[in-house]
């Protein structure tokens, strides 16, 4: 650090007439754009963002390649029913094989985007700048959703083409086939909403470890658990779980027993996310920071 | 102008801030004084809308903080140092704050220059010393060129150079007509910096007055007298109504009478004086006197009680905020 800080340096630059503006001003649209810019700066200026997003791309493409290759090389050991399932929805198989792992990067980063503010204390600086609080959460969610969407598509398209090339001998699929383009774009949409879902959990829980545990519970634990429930109740609960419902958007074919169409499922996921985010916003506004 | 009216904050049964009212006027540095745990930080957080009051109001120029459209352009705040993401650079921390209210990014460079962090602007804050974090906090408070400054223990962790610089900065800002509220548990620092004082203990107001007035009202004036015939002098003074203490060396400490009167009496009695010096208690003593009953624990354990000659003594005891 420089030691050249003395009283003599005082007079410089403290008064800045062009900085000072009236006390209560502002076009709310302009100020929300400012918040988006600010949240983008926050997101890009920490290393965890870069690492998590690189992990998202690398693991998606990596696991898609690996699992597609395994599926082809083990093809003869599959039961006819399993083979049929893959052939009915090769795009869904390809996308699912990568994103089932890489979605955890989105979960962790989404949680951190919020909980790192609490653990470092930056939340107080942030809320001093945006004392209404909820606009900050909205801007954060929007920026993160947009960034995750773009990066997830950067992962989804190569994954699809690599996977389709590997699977070509057993379950050929082309981007021009019905619903395939929607599924590939849908993988990014799913990841994007999952990111906001993670922010909502992070806002509710505020502690990194607890929030990550919470979201992993939602994504990985709840769904197999619900399948254990007997009969149609379990089937219904399973179908309406946030991530189970949301994943339909990244598949092309519906199974005969699916309760929700791709877009309906995505809507259910959106409702879950909106509800949790609204609860998070309410608590963010009420709680002491 | 900061106005605090009947402000309260309860945590369970414990009142951290209890029916507190005071005002902070523009153009002066107001010291916000109290022992550790008195509720200073909590009060500041309530003024800044970070905590919800259990009762009462706090306004800045008549408006609650949460109602300000562009708060950073009105109020600059420094809370605990180090409330910055350790992986972010100083520049990016200030940049994101500036962007929330469309403050030009060159202002970020200006405040970094001002606090002397120019050379480390792009280093991660995680590697900063406490003093550097404190400077970054001061930079963020000045970012929007605010007319009100609320600073919680701003000199913690600053080196003597930095304390000197910061003391002048506060006086300069107040001189420009800004409202400056600075909390501290260091009486000597406040004696040098603050024109007026708000003193609290256990969340309640103990005094609000000018610094001068606070000291004179809360500390007794005594006169130290040295005389070769001190026993004779003692009798003269006692006869005139004084309370006199004598120490081993024969030095008299005289209460009640002032130096002029003591000189007159000695002269009339034909007694020689070797020293006649009025002693007024320091702000430290006044503060100790007034907060004696409301200290959660004894402040003298953590703060040098000697109000002596070196007010630039660096303070290495960061105050923890109230519960």
Image (cartoon, rainbow, N blue to C red):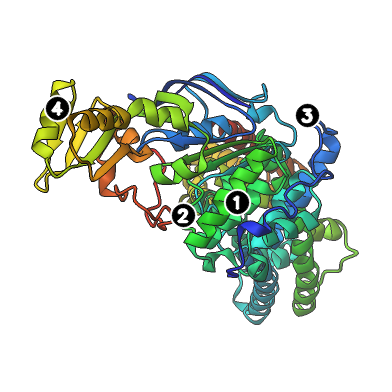
Crowd tier of the residue under label 1, counting other residues whose Cα lies within 10 Å: few below 14, some 14–19, many 20 or above:
many
Measured in 3D between alpha carbons, the distance from the residue under mark 1 to the one under mark 2, in whole angstroms, is 32 Å
In the depicted view, which residue is nearer to us: A273 or A176? A273
Residue labelled with disc 2: A209
Give the residue at the far right of this rendering: A176
- Disc 2 crowd, CA 10 A, few/some/many (<14, 14-19, 20+): some
Chain name for mark 1: B
The reply to the same-chain question for discs 3 and 2 is yes
Q: Secondary structure at mark 1?
A: helix
Residue on which disc 3 sits = A24
Can you tell which of label 1 and label 4 is closer to the viewer?
A: 4
Circles 3 and 2, Cβ within 8 Å, touching? The answer is no
Q: Position of residue A3 (x, y in %)?
A: 58, 69
Residue that mark 1 sits on: B138
Q: Mark on residue B236? A: 4
Residue B290, can we see it? no
Binning the other alpha carbons within 10 Å of mark 4 as few (below 14), some (14 to 19) or many (20 upward) gives some
Sequence order check: which comes first, mark 3 or mark 2? 3
């Amino acid at each position: 650090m420089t030691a050249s800080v003395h009283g003599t340096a005082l007079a410089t630059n403290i008064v800045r007439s062009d900085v000072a503006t009236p006390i209560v001003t502002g076009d709310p649209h302009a100020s929300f754009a400012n918040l988006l810019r600010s949240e983008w700066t926050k997101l890009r200026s920490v290393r965890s963002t870069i690492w998590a997003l690189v992990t998202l791309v690398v693991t998606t493409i990596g696991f898609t390649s690996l699992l597609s290759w395994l599926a082809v090389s083990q093809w003869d050991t599959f039961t006819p029913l399993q083979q049929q399932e893959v052939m009915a929805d090769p795009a869904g198989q390809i996308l699912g094989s990568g994103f089932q792992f890489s979605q955890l990067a989105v979960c962790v980063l989404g949680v951190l985007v919020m909980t790192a503010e609490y653990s470092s204390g930056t939340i107080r600086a942030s809320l001093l700048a945006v004392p209404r609080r909820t606009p900050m959460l909205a801007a954060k969610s929007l920026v993160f959703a947009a960034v995750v969407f773009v990066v997830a598509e950067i992962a989804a398209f190569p994954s699809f083409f690599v996977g389709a090339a590997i699977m070509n001998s057993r379950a050929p699929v082309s981007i021009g086939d019905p619903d395939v383009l929607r599924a590939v774009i849908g993988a990014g949409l799913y990841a994007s909403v999952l990111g906001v879902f993670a922010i909502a959990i992070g806002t509710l829980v505020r502690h990194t470890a607890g929030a990550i545990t919470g979201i992993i519970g939602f994504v990985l634990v709840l769904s197999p658990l619900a399948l254990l429930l007997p009969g149609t109740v379990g089937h219904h609960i399973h179908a309406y779980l946030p991530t189970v419902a949301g994943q339909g958007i990244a598949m092309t074919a519906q199974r005969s027993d699916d309760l929700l169409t791709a877009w309906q499922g995505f809507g259910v996921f959106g409702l879950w996310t909106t509800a949790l985010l609204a609860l998070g916003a309410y608590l963010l506004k009420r709680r002491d920071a | 102008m900061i106005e605090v009216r009947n402000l309260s904050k309860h945590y369970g049964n414990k009142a951290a801030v209890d029916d507190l009212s005071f005002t902070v006027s523009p153009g002066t540095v107001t010291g916000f004084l109290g022992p550790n745990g008195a509720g200073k930080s909590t009060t500041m957080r309530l003024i800044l809308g970070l905590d919800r009051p259990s009762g009462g109001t706090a306004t800045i120029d008549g408006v609650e903080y949460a109602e300000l459209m562009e708060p950073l352009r009105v109020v600059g705040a420094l809370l605990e140092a180090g409330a910055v993401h350790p992986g972010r650079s100083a520049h990016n921390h200030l940049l994101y704050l500036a962007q929330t209210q469309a403050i030009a990014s060159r202002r970020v460079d200006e405040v970094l220059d001002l606090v002397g962090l120019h050379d480390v602007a792009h280093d991660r804050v995680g590697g900063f010393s406490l003093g550097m974090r404190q400077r970054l906090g001061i930079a963020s408070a000045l970012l929007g060129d605010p007319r009100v400054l609320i600073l919680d223990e701003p000199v913690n962790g600053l080196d003597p150079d930095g304390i000197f610089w910061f003391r002048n900065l506060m006086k300069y800002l107040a001189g420009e007509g800004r409202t400056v509220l600075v909390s501290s548990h260091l009486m000597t620092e406040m004696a040098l910096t603050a024109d007026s004082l708000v003193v609290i203990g256990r969340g309640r107001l103990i005094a609000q007055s000018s610094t001068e007035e606070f000291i004179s009202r809360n500390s007794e004036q005594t006169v130290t007298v040295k005389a070769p015939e001190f026993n004779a002098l003692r009798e003269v003074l006692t006869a005139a109504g004084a309370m006199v203490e004598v120490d081993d060396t024969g030095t008299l400490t005289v209460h009640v009478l002032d130096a002029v009167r003591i000189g007159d009496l000695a002269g009339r009695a034909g007694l020689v004086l070797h020293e006649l010096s009025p002693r007024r208690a320091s702000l430290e003593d006044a503060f100790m006197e007034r907060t004696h009953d409301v200290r959660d624990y004894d402040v003298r354990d953590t703060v040098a009680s000697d109000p002596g000659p070196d007010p630039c003594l660096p303070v290495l005891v960061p105050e923890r905020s109230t519960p």
